[in-house]
Image (cartoon, rainbow, N blue to C red):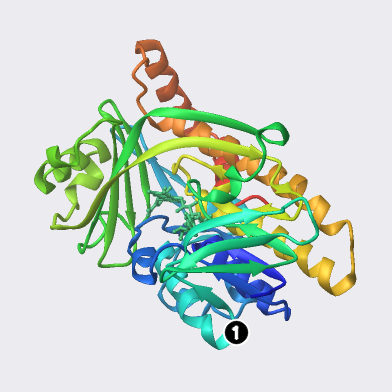
Amino acid sequence: MRTQVAIIGAGPAGLLLGHLLRAEGIDVVVVERATPDYVLGRIRAGVLERTATMLMERVGLAGRMHREGLPHDGFALADGDRLIRIPVTELTGHHVLVYGQTELTRDLMEAAPARGLQVLYGAADVALHDLESDAPYLTYSQDGRAERIDADFICGCDGFHGPSRKAVPASVGAAYEKLYPFGWLGILADVPPCHHELIYANHDRGFALASMRSATRSRYYIQVPLDEDLGDWPDDRLWDELAVRLGPEAAASLTRGPAIEKSIAPLRSFVFEPMRHGRLLLAGDSAHIVPPTGAKGLNLAASDVHYLSEALVRHYRHGDQDAIGGYSQKALARVWKSERFSWQLTKLMHRFPETDAFDRRMQLADLDYIATSRAAQTTIAENYVGLPL
Ligand code: FAD
Ligand code: DHB
């Protein structure tokens, strides 16, 4: 098979990129290892910034998102006792939208056939070839048959563990990484949220987050050690811990219910440079990971896809030979700023094993400063709603 752009991975980055290119009449094929149900079963991000919502509008798939998504004008930081509200809309003029990654992916997935976006699910052993030539290609197998796709460009949207980044020779790339000594234990439950806005809490016992998917579905997280066993966290224990860490105000209106999903995710900061090698272009988690504090992962995938689709459209429509070459630098400038924000908010809100009494007082002083400084709140708010493209 031959196409103009072959995309590896049908997560949010791959599907959004595919739709943006199809809207410009560019031929695209997406190859995905998993099944559609598996992709939709992964419970991940919940907060969209303007970049992501703007791209959904651009591809004409924002209808359900605007009908069902919940606009949020602020969120709270908690220090164990009180809620410190960050009024993001008042400070920046923009809001964020609570709309699950699962729903966004579903909207993109369901619209694909009608838009001529071919997505091949169940593609095994995807391998990249001849990336430094003008004729790169992919090989994979499907239902036991060996297949090949020739393309002008290959876009690696295959997440952190996919083959794309690994296809870049070590001598031309550099990886920057920070691992955190804890993970997030998440629970999804069909109960009303405990608060009308998100709460990020730093308690003596560790971090907790109260989030939501709708007025009747809540998503909560607590910080746990990396080697924690999910079996040690029956629902009751988890609700008790959330009630303590989120503080008295949230605990008073915490509704408990059975978990419909429960999992532990490790935290990591990671950037791979450059995001282009020959005819291979990386976007989203394949090139970078942020710890989830601040909800930047999915939004960063969206801004990569914005820059990448712009570069490919300029290449195909306007014959701009420099467009592709400028992609990596443009995307990385924004990536590093989101890495900074996510890293800083993670440090501010979590208990680290080495945290001593002085470090703890520094965190509390920081939170107290934020509570009283409009300048500090503005800094947080403008990063939270998303820096300009
Ligand atoms: P992905 O969503 O990972 O999509 C990559 C796709 O590539 C997948 O469908 C995968 O099956 C496919 N693929 C992988 N390997 C191959 C292969 N060999 N061949 C073909 N296809 C392949 N962000 C937040 O903002 N808030 C959160 O709460 C949050 N929670 C998260 C929890 C977890 C467990 C993880 C892993 C991430 C979380 N994130 C969160 C981050 C956010 O979900 C990601 O940043 C976002 O999914 C990135 O989108 P992507 O399309 O780049 O990658
Ligand atoms: C969610 C996850 C986040 O990492 C975050 O910062 C906010 C919300 C969520 O899953 O709802």
Q: How many marks?
A: 1
Front residue of this view, candidates 93 and 55: 55
Viewer-side residue, 298 vs 130: 130
Q: Is residue 34 left or right of residue 332?
A: left
The x and y percentages for residue 93 are 61, 58
| Quadrant where the N terminus is found in the figure | bottom right
Q: Is residue 24 left or right of residue 336?
A: right
Visible residue check, residue 224: yes
Camera-nearest residue between 289 and 358: 289
Where in the figure is residue 24, as x and y percent of width and height?
73, 78
Q: Tell me the SS state at disc 1.
A: loop
| 160 lies left or right of 172 | left
Residue drawn at x 27%, y 58% is 218
> Which residue type carries mark 1?
Gly
- Taking the spot 70% from the left edge, 49% from the top edge, the residue there is 331
Q: Is residue 389 visible?
A: no
The residue nearer to you, when weighing 54 against 115, is: 115
Q: Measured from the top left, where is residue 37 in percent x and y?
A: 34, 70
Residue 315 occupies which quadrant of the picture? Answer: bottom right
Left or right: 342 in relation to 322: left
Vertical comparison of 3 with 200: above or below: below
Measured as percent of width and height from the top left, residue 132 is found at: 77, 50
Q: Quadrant of residue 78?
A: top left
Where 101 falls versus 336 (above or below)? below
Residue 180 against residue 386 in the figure, above or below? above
Residue farthest along the front direction in this orientation: 145
Q: For ligand 1, tell me if the residue under mark 1 lies within 8 Å.
A: no
Residue at 52% over, 63% down: 140
The quarter in which the C terminus is drawn is bottom right
* Residue holding disc 1: 116
Q: Residue at coordinates 68% horizontally, 79% vertically from top-left?
A: 23
